[in-house]
Image: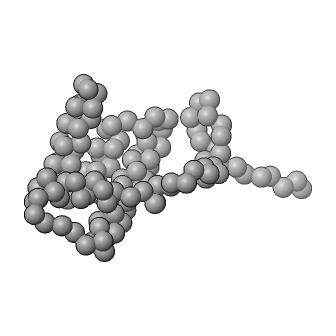
Amino acid sequence: MARRTIHKYSYCKGHLSPISRKKSSSSTSLSHRNYSLYVNRVLKEVVPQRGMSSRTLDFMNTLINDIFDRIAKEAHHLMHFRKRCTLTPEDIQKAVYMLLPESLAKYAVTFGSEAVHRFVRS
């Protein structure tokens, strides 16, 4: 009896590449992105006379990366659940509503949509 090898392939038409791909050789990966500069800029806009310790900045950076990863994974699951090949803004918004508390999710989606519209117009 011959052994069959089972491969996991994506089910999108025209996309027969394996789901688990090799990691790119770029120096920055998603888990190592650093948002400290942006956190400092926002802090200086809100409270110009205050600063943050490097330990607090590291914690904020870890928190942002963790939430980003969770939203990305949940949006990916929603995309596959709907049997779609393209990640849509609706997938991301639904993932945000599923992961964050109601009032925080509403503000996140509102400000995120506004930022995207400003970016598209510019």
For the N terminus, which image quadrant?
A: bottom right
Specify whether residue 108 is in view.
Answer: yes
Task: State the residue in front, 38 or 103.
Answer: 38
Task: State the residue in front, 2 or 87.
Answer: 87
Eyeballing the image, is 93 above or below 105? above
Image mark count: 0
Specify whether residue 67 is in view.
Answer: no
Where in the figure is residue 110, as x and y percent of width and height? Answer: 17, 42
Colour mode?
A: one colour
Given the current orientation, which residue lies at the most extreme right position?
1
Given the current orientation, which residue lies at the most extreme top position?
121
Identity of the residue drawn at 35% across and 41% down: 91
* Left or right: 25, with 34 as reference point: right
Identity of the residue drawn at 32% across and 49% down: 95
Task: State the residue in front, 57 or 120.
Answer: 57
* Left or right: 7, with 98 as reference point: right
Identity of the residue drawn at 13% across and 52% down: 45
Given the current orientation, which residue lies at the most extreme front position?
49
Q: Residue 99's quadrant in the figure?
A: bottom left
* Left or right: 17, with 102 as reference point: right
* Left or right: 58, with 104 as reference point: right
Where in the figure is residue 8, as x and y percent of width and height? Answer: 65, 49
For the C terminus, which image quadrant?
A: top left
Where in the figure is residue 12, as x and y percent of width and height? Answer: 56, 35
